[in-house]
Amino acid sequence: MLRFVALFCVVALVNGQTTPVDLCTANSGLLPMNTYIEGCDSLPCDLPQLQDAEINIIFRAPWTINRMRTLATAHLPGMVALPYPLQANSETCNFLTSTKCPVKKDEIVQYALKMFIQPSFPVGVESTIEFRINDVDRNSSVVCIRVPVRIVGPVNSGVRDNNVNIA
């Protein structure tokens, strides 16, 4: 019964926030149950430079997985595909929100990836990024999504400047 309630909650979340994504073309892997990129209401997704993009992925584990790593590849027009450095954020198991590794076969997994948008991607650049979650032990893709993005200027963080006088 508890499993049914948990699945119902996941389905409700999935229907509430979804970013359309495609299956990867350069890498293998299944589409997840749901993907939501924070602030992405339409494609291409606007990703603010010098800030973290937040990508939330819900998927069903196709087999038992002990260790996972996320890889990102930027496909720029007219250029070779470039691996995008996720550094410590590539350790997928550290960012699971509904469970922890090892993940059991058929378990519903919620994953929150934060990807810092480097200054090497200038404002105005449009690209397609593939995000692939790999099973480290099997060296096999678990999930892979492809999404068009556009780099935009940094978004105001909403932090108030204490030096401004309000009259």
Image: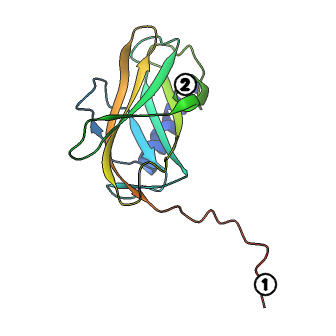
Say which residue label 1 marks: 165
From the top left corner, tell me how far across and down residue 144 is, in percent. 34, 30
The type of residue carrying mark 1 is: Asn
Name which quarter of the figure residue 125 lies in: bottom left
Residue 133 visible in the picture: yes
Q: What residue do we see at 58% from left, 17% from top?
A: 101
Q: Reading the chain from its start, which is encountered first: label 1 or label 2?
A: 2
Q: In which quarter of the image is the N terminus?
A: top right
From the top left corner, tell me how far across and down residue 112 is, in percent. 54, 37
Determine the secondary structure under disc 1: loop
Q: What residue do we see at 47% from left, 34% from top?
A: 85
Say which residue label 2 marks: 91
- Real-space Cα separation, disc 1 to disc 2, in angstroms: 45 Å
From the top left corner, tell me how far across and down residue 82 is, in percent. 34, 35
What number of labels is visible?
A: 2
**Residue nearest the observer in this picture, 82 or 93:** 82
Q: How crowded is mark 2: few (under 14 residues within 10 Å), some or many (20 or more)?
A: some
